[in-house]
Image: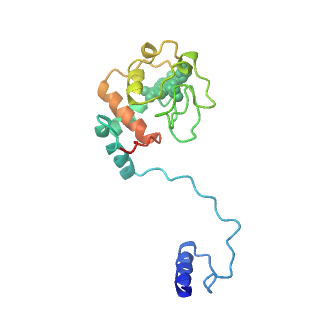
Amino acid sequence: MRSLNLAAVAALCVIVSACSKDGGSSSQAPADAPTPAAAPAPTDAEKAAALAALPAPYNTGDLSNGQSKFALCRSCHTITEGGPDLTGPNLYGVFGRKAGVKEGYSFSDAVKAAGFIWDAQQLDKWLADPRGFMPGTKMTFAGIKNEKDRIDLIAYLKVETGYQTPAK
Ligand code: HEC
């Protein structure tokens, strides 16, 4: 058992490369261990996998077209985790969240009273014609008339805002 432990300690030493030559058995854990870093940004491969896991028609969405359509939103919205609210609220985690409840942002009464949970269907109607879909909203955006552009943008937003496809 002891040799096994030593092997494990030695392996750890290789990883942290901070142990003394005796295998580190007498050294203490460093008090100033670095705090765990934030989760790394997903790689392109992870984004492709997240896209493929979406329900149709979003699983075949064009992420690069979605990204270029997001240019229509980015003057008012950030989508990164913990990103600031601009004219509109930060959109990280919006899928699966109730409309108008994101903390720290002052929504219109119309959105606060909407009472639904954001999913692809609601977002599609919202993006096609925000003020027609929800009279009284303060989102002054004309809408995206092209359905394929909305699909691509929603796929992009799902992949970028931390949406987790529910396990089947
Ligand atoms: C001119 C600024 C502006 C633009 C452009 C804009 N938005 Fe908004 N957005 C807002 C505002 C303001 C609100 C809050 C609406 C309210 O409270 O009535 C909002 C709210 C939202 C919400 C509801 C969030 C929640 O938590 O309920 C979503 C989703 C959204 N926008 C998505 C988008 C997307 C996607 C685009 C690009 C196609 C976009 N918006 C373009 C200003 C904008």
Q: Quadrant of residue 103?
A: top right
Residue 32 point in image, percent of width and height: 69, 65
Please tell me how many numbered marks the rendered image carries.
0
Residue 57 point in image, percent of width and height: 29, 34
Residue at 57% x, 38% y: name it: 83
Q: Quick one: 84 or 94, which is closer to the camera?
A: 94
Q: Quick one: 153 or 67, which is closer to the camera?
A: 153
Residue at 66% x, 65% y: name it: 33
Q: Look at the image and tell me whether residue 126 can be seen.
A: yes
Residue at 40% x, 20% y: name it: 143
- Left or right relative to 45: residue 2: right
Identify the image quadrant of the N terminus: bottom right
Q: Residue furthest right?
A: 31
Q: Is residue 156 above or below residue 34?
A: above
Give the colour scheme of this rendering.
rainbow
Q: Is residue 5 above or below residue 41?
A: below
Residue 117 point in image, percent of width and height: 47, 28
Identify the image quadrant of the C terminus: top left
- Left or right relative to 130: residue 12: right
Residue at 34% x, 47% y: name it: 48
Q: Look at the image and tell me whether residue 76 can be seen.
A: no
Residue 105 point in image, percent of width and height: 61, 28
